[in-house]
């Protein structure tokens, strides 16, 4: 009996160690995340209901929902929120549809196709600072784009791409699309290469060939990848900052200012830390909603398959 009880204790100790071991491996990462993400997030949430009284940030005063009331009555905030949702409406559909077409194009077994893949992916690895400066030159009123359009006879004088409220936001969107096409193309390419060639061969026998096969086979089988790209690009679109900062700095007249840039402006230009934390909370709720949407789409995709 004593031997049996000893063996049971040993088994229980081994099982306990096996359950504890993964958490010990996660402990260093959780420790770093706690100090760099979780604690600052809690402090930011605390500051949304308080007002900092000194530069050091050690003295705060409870203001309740004053920051939220200010946010509700802030016309610039609603303008930046509208610009952000406009980014979602225009940029996300392009980044969902066009990269799929590029992935289908570069998935062909042709000589030198790897060079085309590299060419489409090159903008992804270019620094946004470099890309922004280069596109600023292209967008100048006497820049390459305007010169090209004037040579074709489409326009008679240069278009102020970055200095006009009508064009500034859309000009920044074009750079975001240019930078993102190759990234999402690679995601789709991985999904396309996981589809067996036998499926397309069987479909061609049934009369589904050419472009039709992509509607009959590619799109249904690529549904999880489409949902993934849609949510990732939507989250990225809500966090657009570098393009705006480098190319327009939110102007002219807040026409290209996004919610993240407005948060940065309030925090580091106006030193309104508490108000910036309130804007950050709204941004967090938007991203959380998009993340939940992604999980729901994944579940619905799994149930369909």
Image (tube, rainbow, N blue to C red):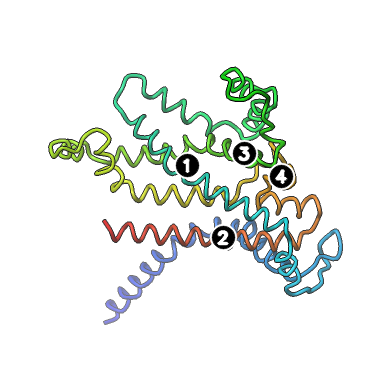
Q: Which mark is residue 132?
A: none
Q: Element at badge 3?
A: helix
| Position in image of residue 263 (x %, y %) | 70, 54
Q: Quadrant of residue 104?
A: top left
Nearer-N-terminus badge (1/2): 1
Nearer-N-terminus badge (3/4): 3
| Quadrant showing the C terminus | bottom left
Residue labelled with disc 4: 250
Residue labelled with disc 1: 94
| Position in image of residue 37 (x %, y %) | 62, 58
| Position in image of residue 121 (x %, y %) | 47, 31
| Position in image of residue 66 (x %, y %) | 76, 71
How would you rate the neighbour count of disc 4 (Cα within 10 Å): few for under 14, some for 14-19, many for 20 or more?
Answer: many
State the separation of the CA atoms marked 3 and 4.
Answer: 10 Å
State the separation of the CA atoms marked 1 and 3.
Answer: 14 Å
Nearer-N-terminus badge (2/4): 4
Give the residue drawn at x 31%, y 22%: 110
Nearer-N-terminus badge (4/1): 1
1 and 2 marks in contact (CB < 8 Å): no
Residue labelled with disc 2: 286
Total labels: the figure holds 4
Q: Residue furthest bottom?
A: 1
Residue labelled with disc 3: 172
How would you rate the neighbour count of disc 3 (Cα within 10 Å): few for under 14, some for 14-19, many for 20 or more?
Answer: many
State the separation of the CA atoms marked 1 and 2.
Answer: 21 Å
State the separation of the CA atoms marked 2 and 4.
Answer: 21 Å
């Amino acid at each position: 009996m004593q031997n049996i009880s000893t063996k049971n204790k040993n088994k229980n100790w081994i099982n306990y160690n096996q359950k504890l071991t993964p958490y010990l491996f996660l402990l260093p990462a959780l420790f770093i995340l706690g100090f760099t993400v979780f604690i600052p997030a809690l402090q930011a949430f605390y500051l949304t209901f308080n007002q900092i009284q000194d530069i050091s940030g050690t003295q705060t005063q409870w203001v309740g929902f004053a920051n939220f009331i200010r946010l509700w009555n802030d016309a610039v905030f609603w303008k930046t929120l509208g610009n952000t949702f406009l980014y979602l409406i225009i940029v996300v559909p392009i980044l969902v549809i066009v990269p799929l077409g590029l992935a289908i194009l570069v998935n062909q077994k042709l000589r030198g196709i790897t060079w085309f893949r590299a060419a489409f992916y090159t903008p992804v690895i270019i620094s946004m600072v470099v890309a922004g400066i280069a596109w600023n030159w292209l967008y100048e009123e006497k820049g390459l784009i305007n010169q090209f359009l004037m040579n074709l006879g489409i326009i008679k004088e240069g278009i102020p791409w970055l200095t006009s409220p009508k064009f500034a936001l859309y000009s920044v969107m074009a750079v975001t699309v240019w930078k993102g096409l190759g990234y999402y193309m690679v995601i789709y390419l991985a999904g396309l290469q996981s589809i067996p060639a036998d499926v397309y061969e069987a479909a061609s026998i049934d009369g589904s060939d050419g472009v039709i096969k992509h509607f009959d086979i590619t799109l249904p089988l690529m549904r999880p990848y489409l949902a993934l790209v849609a949510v990732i690009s939507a989250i990225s679109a809500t966090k657009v900052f570098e393009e705006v900062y480098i190319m327009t700095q939110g102007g002219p007249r807040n026409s290209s200012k996004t919610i993240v840039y407005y948060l940065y402006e309030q925090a580091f230009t106006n030193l309104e830390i508490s108000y910036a934390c309130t804007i950050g909370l709204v941004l967090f709720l938007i991203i959380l909603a998009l993340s939940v949407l992604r999980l729901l789409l994944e579940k619905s995709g799994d149930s369909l398959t």
